Image (cartoon, helix red, strand yellow):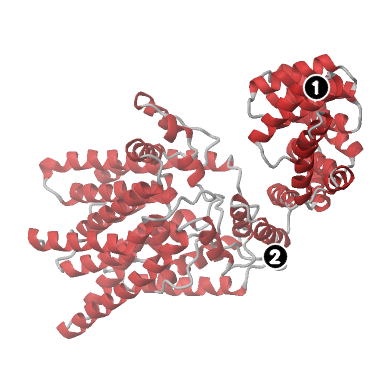
Amino acid sequence: MKLFLSKKPFLIYGFILFICVFIVFANTLGHDFLTNWDDQENVINNDFVLNTQTKDIYEAFIPRFSDNEYQPLTLLYFWLIAKLFGIGPAAFHFFNILLHAFNTVVLFLFFSRFIKELKISFLSALIFAVHPMQSEVVAWVSAANYLLFTFFSLGVLMNFNYFLSGKERFKMVYYILACLLFLLSLLSKSTAAFLPLVLLGLVLYHKKMNFKTIVKLIPFFLLSFLFVLLALKMKSDTLETIPYNFSLIDKPFVASFIFLIYIFKIILPFNLSALYDYPLKEDGFLPIYFYFSIIVMFAVLFFIYKIREKKLILLFFLFFTASILPVLHLIPYYHVGFYADRYAYFGIGGFSFGILCFLYEKLKNVKPRRNLIIAVLVYVIIISGLSFNRNEIFANNITFFKSITDKQTRNIIANYRLAQSYEMINQYGNSLRYYNAAIENNTFYVKSLFMGRGLVLYKLKDFQNAQKDFSKVLEHEPYDRDALMNRGLSNVMMNDYDKALNDFSLILETDPNNASALVNRGGVYLNTGDAPNAIFDFDKSISLDSNNASLYYNRALAYEQVMNVDLALIDYNRSINLNPQFFEAYNSRAVLKGRFLDDIDGAYEDVLRALEIKPDMQNALGNKAYINFLRGDTIAACNDWKNLSEMGNQNALSLFNQNCN
């Protein structure tokens, strides 16, 4: 069918689509970043985005195998927004909406090349624009890679279609543009590797399957192959993989189920989730509905066979199928979730267009066709409301992950990330609840779960159970430095100094210059009265970091234990010079001056300075009271003891009763 398109209605339809996108997704403009779901790594803590100079942007194209994906154009997209508007989330959300609006209009233009009924192209693009499954891509900053690869991919389809059906003299221009845009699409996200299958569908649709056309397809398939290899390599190095594999027997059932569930959710977009958990296998078998899904799949294939002469519908069925092919678990390419709404972003438009074309053709009479248009418009209004509401779950970390755990209480990743999110805002009780849920539902050891829960228990001062979680990590990884460090600190808080010394010493056996282990072991030696060993550890720490005020302060305390007053005073002075706000150092130097140097005035000066910095420091208030008492200023001393006793200090109350009545 030839293009039947006048300029005016096209502009009107395009404008309506653009406005509809902004109306439906406008409430995302006030959303925060999802800092616990890739936005941290991709944007706000990404060194390239924050610090790269314009002359160095070529570095985005250098593959880094420590990254999860190779997507240099997406990286440049984030960099450009940050460069122009800063790191505030509003600009990133605005450009996500803008890209989605552009994609919608271009998709409308593409559909219009195949059917003269402009309203069918418009309604198909409108469903793509406002569908609730699109919320994840538009409302989540890091999902901009889907928007970018779709933008360039639609350009590929437009130009390749012109190449196949346009005038002879422009064909090579369209072909070259299609090749360049395909490369840009792959550089935005390697998922675009499926696109040559759609191009093949266009070739079949236009009945241009000949040697010359096949040769023209080779560069597309070759680029796809290279980017798939690169993507598999980068995914294999990811830190967050799912230890779940499907057997060869499972794969067709899994692929059928995912394929059908996408169709179902596109038609009836209810009970959506930002993350869908993997199915639980019992005795090696998938849930029963997976096996029934392949029967339904055969029915779908039979339907396709029956309409095989309807090449337009088959083309857009392929458009949809090819877009979700990479996520059907047919190849060992692991995802955090079993499937996700965002994977269908590109395919929703093709599926909608194919269905509407089929229904419109079946309804030959004017009235049934009019009823179809009305029904679709009602459907669009309903799903627009669903999308507007769904956008709110992407407002912040808590709303995002809680929306998943509310529907999937056993989802390990969602429980874990929600626990982390609560921890970020110091809600440790809620954090512990979701760490417990993640661990209870997990059947295999995961270091991050026990390490994370241990840290929360430590912050809740449940040192005994924190120590157990760190020990659990060490059962599997005996020399894990973080676990040894945290268990050592837990042992310190429980006054189990022998075990703490052992933990810190184990770290230093493999990493003799570990500054934190040296400082913590030195602190244990100091608490147990082993000042010489404490001084040894603090000496080494200072040699590694000579500008750390706390290290000099700790060594001064150790020198004081061995009565080396002169060296203690030198270290107190150094710590104060490095940090003039170090109130503990002023207070300790005051004690040293008063006790060993008979410098009462100097001690009084120091204690006043400590209280100037921290007025509620009880040790300093007690020292000030004692110094006032030594100086014969009993009234001032009594006032200080009274103030301290009102803070709940029983020793001050006793001294007040003894000396001030």
User: From the viewer's perspective, is 40 left or right of 380?
Assistant: right
* Rendered view: 601 above or below 425: above
The spot of residue 368 in percent (x, y) is 21, 84
Q: Quadrant of residue 236?
A: top right
Foreground: disc 2 or disc 1: 1
Quarter of the N terminus within the rendering: bottom left
Report the number of numbered marks. Answer: 2
User: From the viewer's perspective, is 258 left or right of 425?
Assistant: left
Sequence-wise, the earlier of marks 2 and 1 is 2
The spot of residue 327 in percent (x, y) is 48, 56
Decide which of 223, 569 is in the foreground and name it. Answer: 569
Q: Amino acid at mark 2?
A: Gly
Q: What residue did someone put label 2 on?
A: 284
Q: What residue did someone put label 1 on?
A: 593
* Rendered view: 445 above or below 599: below
Spatial CA distance of label 2 from label 1 is 74 Å
* Rendered view: 505 above or below 565: below
The spot of residue 374 in percent (x, y) is 23, 79
User: From the viewer's perspective, is 628 left or right of 425?
Assistant: right
Tell me which residue sits at (43%, 30%) in the image.
Answer: 51
Decide which of 269, 542 is in the foreground and name it. Answer: 542
Q: Amino acid at mark 1?
A: Lys
* Rendered view: 645 above or below 289: above
Q: How dense is the environment of label 2, judged by Cα within 10 Å: few (below 14), some, or many (20 and up)?
A: few
Q: Is residue 318 visible?
A: no
Q: Is residue 457 visible?
A: yes
